[in-house]
Amino acid sequence: MEKKESSLKSTIAVSLTNYLDAGAIVAGASGLTLWQKYLGLSEVHLGWLNFISANCLGAAVGAIIGGFLADKYGRKFIFTYNLLVYMTGVLLIMLSVNFPMLLAGFLVTGISVGVGVPASWTYISESSEINNRGRNICISQMSWGIGPMIILLLGMFFAPGGYLFGWVESVAHFFGGDGMAENTVNVFSSRIVFLSLFVVAFIAWNLQRGLQESAEFTAQKAEGKKNGLMDNIKVLFQNNIAVKTVCFLATIYLTWNLVASVMGFFQPHIYETAGGVSNEQANWMNFIQWAIIVGVTFITSKLIDKTSHKGIYIFGLVAALSAWFVIVAIGVDGPAGLWAFAILWGIQGGASPQIFYALWGSELFPAKFRAGAQGLMFFIVRGLSALWGLVFTYIYGENGEGFTIAAYCMITLLLISLVVGVVLAPNTRGKSLEQITKERYGSLDN
């Protein structure tokens, strides 16, 4: 019982990384229109913010660095220093007065998010009991949903016309005087939302740096095997099973994430431009959607260690495809289409390929290069998602005129994720990490 409580406690502490990951994306998304008006940004500028953010390139670069650092120096090394970088990036965003400064803040924050993700998922799996590994990964995904819920709620309260906007105006005038332009005052609501992320990051940093090192990493280090960056890259790419596993996981996660990354960053903006709703309405819809994601993820956490992984995987992608078929059939220029899409996309989020990518990514590789392999895949996925975010802005258009074409692209990507996942899904439920490693790799004493 003591071990169970310990794994749950460490899971919650490490899961704050997911809160900060999704929180950074949604904080940027919920205030995107405010920054656009304040700095006079075009859709292309918004595409670049997405390109280098925690949603895409920033996280991609950070992941490949953080994954191999976690394998070389340990998971605790990442927890000790990484969130200091995150707080620096958030501070840059809070204080931004021009586009380059805002861009730099998004980049630094994104890199930190990427550094933390492979180490956190690896640590959760390595510290979990066999029959709780899926549950603990789901808890980390619930944190990924709770973050946006809270950030969106704050965004709505602080947004122009929100319940607490009067307080935002007082803060803005305190720092900038009474002669501030309207758009300059309004963007303070986004600055305050990012301040909340700074506070959570500080709390998470204090919790995470107090964690014990992963037992598997400690055992690996005690054996005296080489675990330098180049050593691990060499072993990873020389092992056919590892390379095939990277291809499998990168495919199911990439095709889903190309869709999810666009929705994570642009969804409120899409609701406003293509759906014709206000910023407040868009954020409320997004909040409800994230609440559905958290609820369905909680249900998944109760089932994932007891039932078919493949069945849950299929359910999630069928819901995702249904959401986009609704767009094609009904459109998003009316409340019925918007709400149907929001609800279905929320359901899929609670059983999405990201849950299984996090679970299988930490199960299907040996401890020697477990975090490094995840970092490599995260780099591939978020890097290509960054390029897709730029392409999407051109397909979508300035006012959403290309949204239907974009929907067909999303359906194609989700179908690929569904087919590949169904055909190649591994059977790891109820097995220890050591057992899975032995079955797949045998001895790795090279």
Image: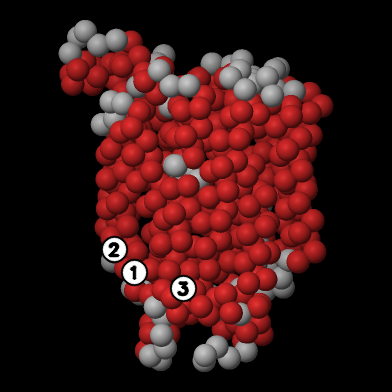
Q: In which quarter of the image is residue 210?
A: bottom left
Apparent side of residue 113 relative to residue 211 in the rendered image (left or right): right
Q: Which residue is rendered at x = 56% and y = 61% of the image? A: 377
Disc 2 to disc 3, how far (Cα)?
Answer: 18 Å
Q: Is mark 3 on a helix, strand or loop?
A: loop
Label 1 Cα crowd, 10 Å radius (few <14 / some 14-19 / many 20+): many
Question: Amino acid type of disc 1?
Answer: Lys
Name the residue that disc number 2 marks: 80
Q: Nearer the viewer, residue 13 or 195?
A: 195
Residue 319 screen position, x and y as percent: 74, 43
Q: Is mark 1 on a helix, strand or loop?
A: helix
Q: Which residue is rendered at x = 46% and y = 61% of the image? A: 64
Name the residue that disc number 1 marks: 76
Q: Is mark 2 on a helix, strand or loop?
A: helix
The image shows a total of numbered marks equal to 3
Q: Which residue is rendered at x = 70% and y = 17% of the image? A: 334
